[in-house]
Amino acid sequence: MENSPSRRDFLKWTGVAFASLALPRVGASAPQQGAQPKGSGTMADFAAPKLDRVRFGMIGVGDRGGSHVAQLMLLDGVDITAIADPYKPAAEGWARHVVQKGRKAPALYTDSDLDYRKLCERDDVDAVIISTPWEWHARQAVDAMKLGKHAFVEVPAGITVDELWELVETSESTKRHCMMMENVCYGREELMVLNMCQMGLFGELLHGEAAYIHDLRFQMHQIDHGTGSWRTDHYVRRNGNLYPTHGLGPICQYMDINRGDRLDFMSSVSSNSRVRAIYAKEQFPEGHPRRSLRFRCGDINTSIVQTVNGRTILVQWDEQLPRPYTRHNFIQGTKGCWGGFPNRMVLEGATPTEEWTEGEALEPFFAKYEHPLWKQIGDEARKAGGHGGMDFVMLWRIVYCLRNGLPLDQDVYDAAAWSVIGPLSEYSVARRGRSVDIPDFTRGAWAKRPPLKLHTV
């Protein structure tokens, strides 16, 4: 069953949006210099009233949104009461899936580009999950919060600095959660490393390396349906790190970003743009529209971020070059380090310091330092799947926190700080790697917040 939005549907989603949700303007003044909203009270460690059951409305049920529907149907205390998607076959297909799982059929909203607003007006929707093209993430989250719904939005949360400030301001003024669904923060390895960092095993943290390296050239064949039918446009229009959060989110949690430290400034450069044009000529016949595209985005982007406390983070992005998948997931402290892809470690006093401990030699460390959350629900997560179980753990935690009136593990300030690397990288790249300040979306609250603690289950 094909559930991805078509190219035509992408234009429906985005056609009216480009005027107000313009891609970052290369000629604009420094993006951090705009007026910052005063705010309406912090959302730091905000806890909403308990919900007996969590009634979700799904906005977008293509490949990603559909997978969320499937995972949610495995959880207790969850209903899907409505689905909005301009691609009617996807909405109808996932509505049937809900019914097949013994649940009431969700209401469908498929008639217009803005039909999702009708979903947000429903009294039987507590929260929305937004899985639409990037241009719509912030707008739909803002609309949902203004209509009284908690907003859970796919990555990135927004693609301009102004959008991200609007998310923060709206969450604060409406007192509704706005969480970017950074699933990688719930991976087994990432949560174990977070546990070890919080135990102080790596000493004082000094440096991290984050990435999203994933050869996605095949998506260019998705002309009428699929992610490539709309994502390809971004490679034509933009130049920077278009997708920064999968690698960056866990590193920020290791370093207590927005909880005692914050991202301060950054510089970014991109390579030449080559391989997508080569791929298009090799894969598509003469006269095909893909062959005439002029790609602007560099094949690989590298950014360096420094935090207020003097730590450094390397952030890389590459969705087209022929190389194995990696997110780096590297963290270095005064007493040791961890690196991912493949997993390897140095821990002073526990392993050799001049060679990696890796493979089966890491098993005792997994046994000793496994995060309590994975100890509790890891078997369920592995069975459910979804990027190795991290999707299940993320949704499980969202539902658990909402049903128990607990703060979320990721808040609107995390969504903004992690996502803003995208538009700021574009600004820096366009100015020969010029350093650019990173906004303090917490307005100073970062300095007094305690470290992240996933609440006891």
Image (cartoon, grey):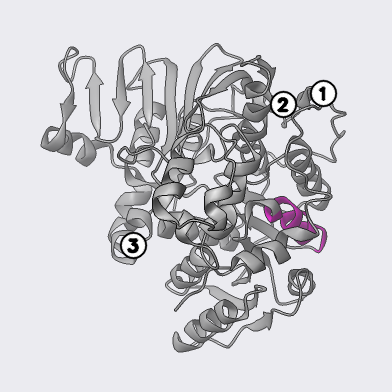
Residue bearing mark 3 = 385
**Picture layout, residue 125 above or below residue 320:** below
**CA separation, marks 3 and 2?**
36 Å
Secondary element type, mark 3:
loop
Secondary element type, mark 2:
loop
Q: Is residue 107 left or right of residue 102?
A: right
Residue range corresponding to the magenta coloring: 136-147
Residue bearing mark 2 = 440
Name the residue nearer the viewer: 11 or 451.
Answer: 11
Q: Residue furthest front?
A: 286
Give amino acid for label 3.
Answer: Gly
Give amino acid for label 2.
Answer: Asp
Residue bearing mark 1 = 29
Q: Residue at x 43, y 38 (%)?
A: 275
Secondary element type, mark 1:
loop
Q: Position of residue 330 (x, y in %)?
A: 36, 27
Q: Position of residue 97 (x, y in %)?
A: 48, 83
**CA separation, marks 1 and 2?**
18 Å
**CA separation, marks 3 and 1?**
45 Å
